[in-house]
């Protein structure tokens, strides 16, 4: 009985070493795949960011145009009001 115990322990130790080595290799391969996937996702997100920037840039320019038109209309209204005041002052 005493002679078989060390042999069983050595066999179990060898099996555990093999199993843990295989699991370690699988973990490394999985992490490599995760890295590749995250790289692809990052590329897709970068492309979407560029497309959204290209789409939002004209909208920003349009809002600037609208702001300029509002300022122009306010100036025109002020000018017309000034002309109206000038005419009422003359009477």
Image (spheres, rainbow, N blue to C red):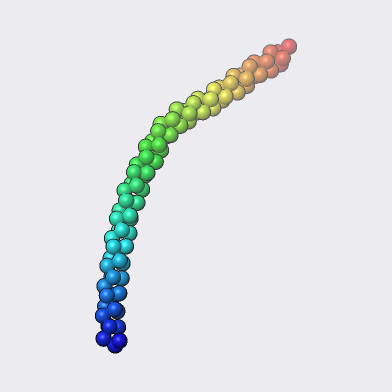
Residue 61: x and y in percent read 46, 28
**Dividing the image into 4 quarters, which one contains the N terminus?**
bottom left
| Identity of the residue furthest to the right in this view | 91
Residue 75 visible from this viewpoint = no
In percent of the image, x 36 and y 48: which residue is there? 38
Q: Would you say 10 lies left or right of 60 here?
A: left
- Taking 2 as reference, is 39 above or below it? above
Q: Residue at x 44, y 30 (%)?
A: 55
Q: Is residue 10 left or right of residue 89?
A: left
> Residue 82's x, y, as percent?
65, 19
In this view, the residue in front, 53 or 37, is: 37
Seen as rendered, the residue at the extreme bottom is 2
**Residue shown at the point (39%, 41%) measured from the top left:** 45
Does 48 appear above or below 26? above
Q: Is residue 50 left or right of residue 80?
A: left
Identify the residue at horizontal 27%, vertical 67% (top origin).
18
**Seen from this angle, which residue lies furthest top?**
91
Residue 79 to residue 61: above or below: above
**Where, by quadrant of the figure, is residue 4 drawn?**
bottom left
Q: Is any atom of residue 77 visible in this view?
A: yes
Q: Nearer the viewer, residue 66 or 14?
A: 14
Of residue 73 and residue 66, the one placed in the foreground of this image is 66
Question: Where does the image place residue 20, in percent across and percent down from the top left?
Answer: 31, 67
Nearer to me, 88 or 22? 22
Q: Is 8 rendered above or below residue 41?
A: below
Q: How many marks?
A: 0
Q: Position of residue 12 (x, y in %)?
A: 30, 74
Quarter occupied by the C terminus: top right
């Amino acid at each position: 009985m005493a002679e078989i115990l060390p042999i069983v322990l050595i066999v179990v130790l060898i099996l555990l070493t093999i199993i843990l080595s295989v699991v370690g290799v699988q973990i490394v391969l999985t992490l490599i795949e995760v890295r590749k996937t995250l790289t692809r996702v990052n590329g897709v997100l970068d492309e979407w960011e560029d497309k959204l920037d290209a789409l939002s840039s004209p909208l920003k320019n349009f809002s600037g145009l609208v702001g300029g038109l509002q300022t122009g209309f306010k100036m025109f209204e002020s000018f017309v009001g000034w002309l109206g005041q000038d005419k009422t002052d003359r009477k």
